[in-house]
Amino acid sequence: MNPRHLSHTVIVPNWRTMRTPLALTAGALALAGLTACSSTTGGGATAGPAATDAAKPGKITVAANDTDCQVSAADLPAGTSTFEVTNSGSKVTEFYVYADGDRVMGEVENIVPGLTRQVIIELPAGAYQTACKPGMIGKGIRNPLKVSGAAVPLTDDVKLAKATADYQRYVKSQSDALLVKTQEFVDAVKAGDADKAKALFPIARTYWERIEPVAESFGDLDPAIDAREGDLAKGEKWTGFHKIEKHLWVTKDISKDGPTADKLMVDVKEIVAKSTTEKLAPLKLANGAKELLDEVATGKITGEEDRYSHTDLWDFAANLEGSQAAVSALRPVLDERAPDLAKTLDEKFAAASETLGKHRAGDGWKLHNELSKADLKELSDAINALAEPISKVAAVVAQ
Amino acid sequence: MTKINRRRLFGLGAAGVAAVGTGAYATHALLEGPPPAAAASTSDPVPFYGEHQAGIVTPAQDRLHFVSFDVTTKKRAELVDMLQEWTVAAARMTQGKDAGTFGAVGGAIEAPPDDTGEALGLPPSGLTITIGFGPSLFDGRFGLGAKRPAALADLPKFPAEDLLADISGGDICVQACAHDPQIAVHAIRNLARIGFGKVSVRWSQLGFGRTSSTSRAQSTARNLMGFKDGTNNLKLEDAALLRQQLWAAPGDGPAWMDGGSYMVTRKIRMNIETWDRTSLSEQQQIFGRDKGEGAPLGGKHEFDEPDFAAKGADGTPTIAVDAHVRLAHPSSHGGARLLRRGYNYVDGSDGLGRLDAGLFFIAYQRDPRKQFVPIQMELGRTDSLNEYIKHVSSGLFACPPGLRDAGDYWGRTLFA
């Protein structure tokens, strides 16, 4: 039980706070709060759009002081709600309702000690935070606020539909190039031209890595194309890019790789056919953008992906570009719903690209084993800095 | 008076409730600042707000997760914003709440949870989270050059040290202490996550057993050499000594540090295996104390004052001239004292069949130039213990004063 929720009960000595899943306590709290407060309404300090919904059960009271911010309800129906904020502290305070990324849904400022003020805020279904700011500085004292009720289905949203269509075009363009470059790679392997195959290996993989999360949805095809030797269980047959990579760089014998190369081409054709006909959901774009950075963080920074050729930075760049393409497609939605997040993503994408850019070599990239530990730490920091805000995109899309 | 008192207790949540349970002393402590109220049991919360930061004189908890960050952002506003976010999360976690307002399972299912979840169902466990600012933060990136306290002077090169740059220094440190290791790790992990893009973990250290007591209510714990460590430590009950030796006072330096304290960390690797092959007599000569009771040689009880003038029948000093207790004693340094808060560590083994183990030494003080530096200079030069130990990392941090209330944040006095 959360100590904050003790406000409606007697304070018991020797009480110990214990973390409990919020969901278990929120319902009971909302009930207690709503039954306790009056249903009269007064003038709003600042008002949102007019109520479009049925009558709401009463006001939500907010008891604010210098160290606490007791909101009488943690669970509300979608629509307009009235918050009545009473400041019993010694400092001037403010009250906010924030959506994800600290987007202000409504606020009331300058509540001097002893004063009560109201604010009417329209909240669609979603997860929000309430905040009191004693002294009007800092992040304030936050509480979660869940708003539930009928929401417009995501696919009905015009902007989201456009986002998925845009990204689908990107997947198609990358798939076309993947087919061409994989064919060239396969032909070089079968012709025994190791130098040409080595040069084509990271290039063909670039198109693959840009759209890998889409490809990954198709079960056993991804491992057939992209498994590393250690990924296999005993008895499983190793196929795909990395098997040929090992033969090109380590054993230096591709004379028996004809069948492997042919199978790679068949698998790539199949996955391209599936990827380009699959109808993508908006959430898939958001999660794909994050998964591509996960790929970087776990496989490329460490040099595990291309452990024989050390061409990991090609894959790194491709993952980054693919992630940015997915975010770009979602950009109109982000601009509308979470402009601060959109701005942060711009900055962090630019910073990550700039950091990676230091390691360009000609038309391509330095090899992983040419980078120092400090170089890799800097790249790792840049990816972490980008991946945290990207992990927030999915919830914005789902709003 | 009563009204303010109740409100403060109320605002402190369970901590305040614990204070009600323990009566007038705790209430008084909350209002007056030091000494901070000790949690009634090892699962209870420790108050987050107060005149001084918690985690310094707070009776030393059993577990430590310490982390040092490099600031990676170049924007002052972004750094301040992160410190505000950290403060909110720290205030919540010390009171047993999730790091974020939605928590590990209360948010939108499409979003990653704003708390990592491993502390669900666990009590606050006496968690304290203490922040410090390293000398490198004042290098000009954030316009803080003029605010660097003179007491935060870079430590000199000491004899008998072999420092690794990768695990030394840092712009900002956070010390998380708790009675449950999972709680300490949870705190650091969630702060590091909030910090991505603004700070980057430079190094971190887990400690599994306290080696110092910071209250007379605690027994003296042992270090991995098997000796009681920190018998003569500064303790929270020593009000006058704490004012004189621990807290930066108005006039000491820049006002932003008034009520703060300076922290020195040293990772001290022990040559455990050779130590264990050393005779009991030599071990006791090296420390200048007996191993069982912890009494100074020639004395009977742990807290007996060492008699440095005493000589044995053969005319040699009972406590050797190079014994640890003599060299570290305040009487050898004009009364200079430290508040030690170290932890034993074992970082697995070193690949040569030896434990990678020792002491993660943490000491708080009013001015390292007058306290840690002269003491360590002497120890590094002559301590007979040096044959068995090696200092491998070093840190120096200015820990600002405590936070007044929820409208305050870490670094406010520095960045304001």
Image (cartoon, rainbow, N blue to C red):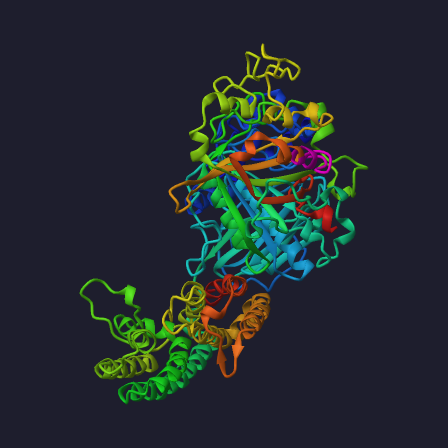
Residue B203: x and y in percent read 54, 50
User: Which residue is outermost to the left?
Assistant: A235
**Residue at the spot x=54%, y=33% of the render?**
B14
**Residue at the spot x=52%, y=54% of the render?**
B193
Instruction: Using the image as rendered, state which of residue B315 and residue A205 is in the foreground.
Output: B315
User: Which residue is outermost to the right?
Assistant: B251
Q: For residue B304, what is the image quadrant?
A: top right
Instruction: Using the image as rendered, state which of residue B90 and residue A299 is in the foreground.
Output: A299
Above or below, comparing residue B99 to residue A9 in the picture: below
User: Which residue is outermost to the top?
Assistant: B313
Q: Which range is magenta?
A: B365-377
Indicate left or right for A227 with B348 as reference: left
Instruction: Using the image as rendered, state which of residue A160 and residue A364 is in the foreground.
Output: A364
Above or below, comparing residue B177 to residue A188 in the picture: above
Taking the image as drawn, is residue A60 in sight?
no
State which quarter of the image contains the N terminus of chain B: top right
Taking the image as drawn, is residue B282 in sight?
yes
Instruction: Using the image as rendered, state which of residue A371 and residue B161 is in the foreground.
Output: B161
Residue B358: x and y in percent read 49, 37
Residue A246: x and y in percent read 31, 74
**Residue at the spot x=68%, y=53% of the render?**
B137
Residue B291: x and y in percent read 49, 21
Indicate left or right for A168 with A191 as reference: right
Q: For residue A179, what is the image quadrant?
A: bottom left
Numbered label tally: 0
Indicate left or right for B399 with A399 as reference: right
